[in-house]
Image (tube, helix red, strand yellow):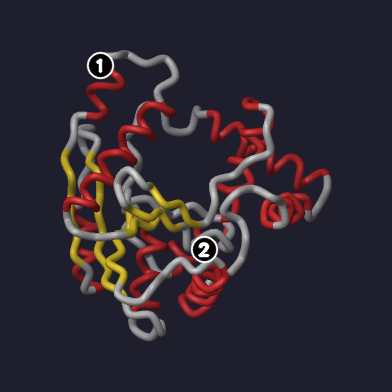
Amino acid sequence: MKLQQLMSYTRKAIDDYSLIDEGDRIAVGVSGGKDSLTLLAAMQGLMRFYPNHFELMAVTVDLGFDGFDLTPVTAYCDELGVRHEIVHSDIGQIIFEDRQEKNPCSLCAKMRKGALNQAVKDLGYNKVAYAHHKDDLVETMLLSLIFEGRFYCFPPKTYLDRMDLTVIRPLMYVEEAEVKGFAKQYDLPVVKNPCPADGVTRREYAKQLVRDIDHESPGAKARLFTAITQSNIPGWNRV
């Protein structure tokens, strides 16, 4: 997928759900993975001509794992002309050494998002962009059905009233396969996830489940996404 197509998908999400207002200061949560780097490229591209003017920066939460080198990511941000702020933390140690969590992902995600959101707020930005793509949304809905017994998926835009911060998800119309293609075509400096639990999570279970369903019933993934967008889930009403 080329940058122009990526920006088209991203702008559609922004316009459909009013994700960007005039004068916004938006921080992209950049993990170093393909999804967040793709989102950063899309947002930087849109910033040049989107009708509502906005500022942009990248924020990375370093979980404290050995060998997590963010130098290539910072160099990429410099290339884009985007400030890159790294927030150092001991989250990895707390999860895997101090607490020795058997199911670490939920707590880790909560702590990582908490650290990211607080950093964004402290830096004076009013919105934070997460790199959830279309596959993430479908997988989240299935996980909610299977493990919580409810039809739910996080919305394109979430206002965190306690922090006075808004979370936006501009990649929601982009499929993971397209993200992979974009990252390869533009040689994005993807940094390998050093987490010991990477690849053995409930999320991976849901990802494989979606693949199987879509293989058995071609087009099922697209229909599942349509079910989300046309449901009565709070926050899913288009403007």
- Tell me the amino acid under the disc marked 1: Glu
Which residue sits at x=41%, y=62%?
39
Which residue sits at x=53%, y=77%?
8
Residue bearing mark 2: 181
Residue 24 horizontal/vertical position (percent): 31, 69
Q: Quadrant of residue 38?
A: bottom left
Residue 151 horizontal/vertical position (percent): 68, 38
Q: Quadrant of residue 99?
A: top left
Look at the numbered disc 2 and give the secondary structure of its residue: helix
72 vs 210, left or right, is: left
Q: Is residue 80 above or below residue 99?
A: below
User: Dot 1: few (<14), some (14–19), or many (≥20) neighbours within 10 Å?
Assistant: few
Foreground mark, 1 or 2, reads: 1
39 vs 61, left or right, is: right
- Tell me the amino acid under the disc marked 2: Gly
Q: Quadrant of the C terminus?
A: bottom right
Residue bearing mark 1: 97
Distance CA(mark 1)–CA(mark 2):
36 Å
Which residue sits at x=29%, y=46%?
163
Of label 1 and label 2, which has the lower sequence position? 1
